[in-house]
Image (tube, rainbow, N blue to C red):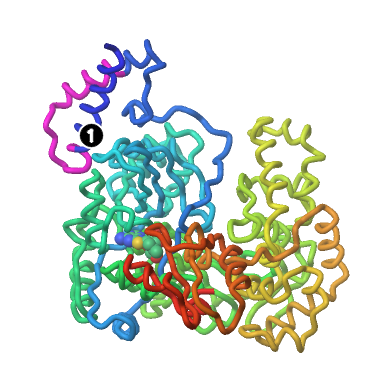
Amino acid sequence: MIESRIKELIEIINKASYEYYVLDHPTITDQEYDDYYKELLSLEEKYPEFKKEDSPTNRVGGEVLDQFTKVTHKVPMLSFDDIFNEDEIVAFDERIRKTISNPTYTVEPKMDGLSGSLIYQKGVLVQAATRGDGITGENITNNVRTIKSVPLHLKKDIDIEVRGEIYMSKASFEKANIEREKKKEPLFANPRNAAAGSVRQLDSKITASRNLDFMAYFLPNPEDYGIKTQSESLEFLRELGFVTNHKLNTVAHNAKEVIAVIDEFSQKRESLPYEIDGVVLKVNSLADEEKLGFTSRVPRWGIAYKFPAVEVLTTLKEIKFTVGRTGKITPNAIFSPVHVAGSLVSKATLHNEDYCNDKDVRIGDVVSIRKAGDVIPEVVEVKLERRKENTTPFQMITECPMCGSTLIKKDAHHFCPNTHCPARNIEGLIHFVSRDAMYIDGFGERIIEDFYNMGYLKTFVDFYFLKNHKEELMELEGFGSKSISNLLESIEESKKNPLDRLLFAIGIRYVGKKTAKILAEYYQTMENFLQTTYEELVAIDNIGEMIAKSIIEYIHDEKNLKLISELKALGLTMEYHGTNIISNEIFQDKTFVLTGTLEQMTREEASAEIEKRGGKVTGSVTKKTSVVLVGKDPGSKYEKAKTLGITIWNESEFLEQL
Ligand code: IVH
């Protein structure tokens, strides 16, 4: 039987891969492996109807995609708040102890890659996705299948979602950069960028060639498998066939123990075969995690401690000035590439004129560069004692390096006042399509620059008119009809984005992602927002005078109003969709039962709030009920919920979750 031989070969080869890549303990020779592989390959070629989803031949990559499809995460993919010192660990522990009397924590190395979600059905890998914005990620299944340490078939034939870090080992990173140097391609700055770039390849053969790895560390639905602690989750993941950090993951009982583990990890850090950028702390008991819950953004039951910034010395070769989307001019130090905290860095910010003068930075100086996590590297110190003779003091430029306009100075910064300055416009367009803004997929910085220079894009409104140039765009080198169609589809899709994304995207000075959300929540529609006043704005929590002034300036500028009304005419949503990430996570797909009398709202209103957040309200308590909301004088449903051990909320807990 051909089919059963194919199945058998798949099993043999997947087991051999597991032993080799996960256990580091091979039981068959390379020759035997190759023979089995060749046999499978030839059978699959002859009998493609028997090719299976978990076949190891899928690992080499093959299909070239036009673009990644989007995937909505069933449970949002969140991250933890970052902390940077021991005091903050003590504070975290104290905060936890306010709710949990004797907490234990898992202390895990913080892998420096990108998080991924893998979905298995009946034990077979069927989907892999990036985190994206936490709600929606990209479907990278073909690429993840090429990662040797990702099991294509679990040891148990179960349905499960597994999360972990996709990363590149230090060795693979070095190798990839040697290859790139040979091909005169730009080098990867660090293993994290290399992993992110490799996993977002439309051609999975390229991903396969990059030798990525996967470390599993999280189950979004541990209760489905009877798991009660994070340690058990990690153990379960290992039993399923994943690589976990079982030799390093530790359990600690208080801040002192946590700090001791961190010390140990920071000493081991250099000698590990992969980059870690800190330590992740999680409350071990899942029941405790549930008690702690979430803030409006992040889980309260965990935190990410980041190792301190690292500094290195280098020689300043040049000072280059760049123009941001607000016209702000930034002097940047340019130097030969140096490794700082796992990154290859060749540029660091010098912030502004005062910063350069205070430090008396000069070309030819030996300077120290600091880099911490995702933060832009900066020049922290000039080694004055090592200064050579005949150096020239820093001189701020007076004209825009892009358009030649005379710069103006506002507070500490210089600005190009020309609203038509190409550099400003291009940066603004790049910002408009970026992930946290309108998230229009398929636009690299280069494409935007090219389209701008060719005259297709002048303002962000022009994105929505690109469809009128479809034929011309298809003529351009590097664009096929499919990629242009996908791009245009992405642009159309972005019209549905909620108001908060749009308010962030249009680039009002000082209106970052968080402020945009606050504004969208408050005003609900663009129309309301445009009618606001300075007084109304400063009365909103977290909106200060500077932001308010900038908003008023923006909405009183005829040019801006015209752009917004054009967007409206094009059919952009311009409304706030409500429901934020956390409410989704708490209510989404959960079943609620209400009993007793609520004081702050009617049962109907409470049901509507639950349903608005993706939850369901039913009449009777069963094992499947997620939460029972208990008001005054509850009925028998309350007793039943207690017997079945179902989560019970009183009204004030419910209001807090809302
Ligand atoms: S748990 C709710 N465990 O660091 C967050 N994350 O903020 C669940 N990371 O974006 C994630 N190593 O990509 C977890 N052992 C580990 C991790 C880890 C690295 C990343 C993850 C997340 C960030 C934590």
Determine whether 56 is above or below 323 in the image. above
Determine whether 424 is above or below 100 in the image. above
Q: Main secondary structure of the magenta part?
A: helix
Q: Position of residue 35 (x, y in %)?
A: 21, 18
Asked whether, in this view, residue 295 is left or right of residue 5, the answer is: right
Say which quadrant the N terminus sits in: top left
Q: Which of the pair 79/649 is nearer the observer?
A: 649
Q: Quadrant of residue 442?
A: top right
Q: Which of the pair 628/365 is nearer the observer?
A: 628
Q: Residue at x 80, y 53 (%)?
A: 571
Q: Residue at x 51, y 30 (%)?
A: 64
Secondary structure, mark 1, is helix
Badge 1: how crowded within 10 Å, few (<14), some, or many (20+)? many
Q: Quadrant of residue 432?
A: bottom right
Residue hosting label 1: 17
Tag 1: amino acid:
Ser
Determine whether 335 is above or below 457 in the image. below
Q: Residue at x 44, y 49 (%)?
A: 196
